[in-house]
Amino acid sequence: MLVVDSIVPGSFAEGLLEPGDIITKVEGKVVTHFLALEDTLDSSVGATVTLNVERGGQPLQATIKVPPPVWLATAP
């Protein structure tokens, strides 16, 4: 189970996820470890990804556009 601890202001997750949200699936695949989420996001830069989330016991779906890594976005 992946629980959102905090949201970085200005990040792609701001306004979509909230602290306490439980991420249950990414692109329809059950995720139980951060590395699985990270792998999916890393391989989806520039694409949209669907997250299934549970918030307060209610299922939600969030679609996010995965931005490039910060180090890449700020490279000269």
Image (spheres, rainbow, N blue to C red):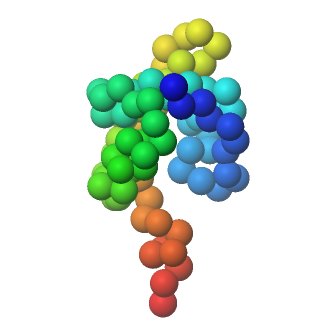
Out of 39 and 46, give the one closest to the viewer. Answer: 39
The picture quadrant where one finds residue 28 is top left
Out of 1 and 56, give the one closest to the viewer. Answer: 1
Q: From this viewpoint, which residue is outermost toward the top? A: 57
Residue 59 as seen in the image, left or right of residue 5: left
Please tell me which residue is depicted at 56% across the width and 44% down the height of the picture: 13
Image coordinates of residue 31 in percent, x first then y, are 40, 31
Count of residue discs: 0
Does 37 appear above or below 45? above
Out of 40 and 55, give the one closest to the viewer. Answer: 40
Please tell me which residue is depicted at 68% across the width and 37% down the height of the picture: 5
The picture quadrant where one finds residue 63 is top left
Please tell me which residue is depicted at 31% across the width and 33% down the height of the picture: 27
Can residue 65 be seen here? no
Image coordinates of residue 72 in percent, x first then y, are 45, 75
Image coordinates of residue 33 in percent, x first then y, are 46, 36
Image coordinates of residue 12 in percent, x first then y, are 54, 50
Residue 72 as seen in the image, left or right of residue 47: right
The picture quadrant where one finds residue 43 is bottom left
Can residue 21 be seen here? yes
Please tell me which residue is depicted at 67% across the width and 51% down the height of the picture: 8
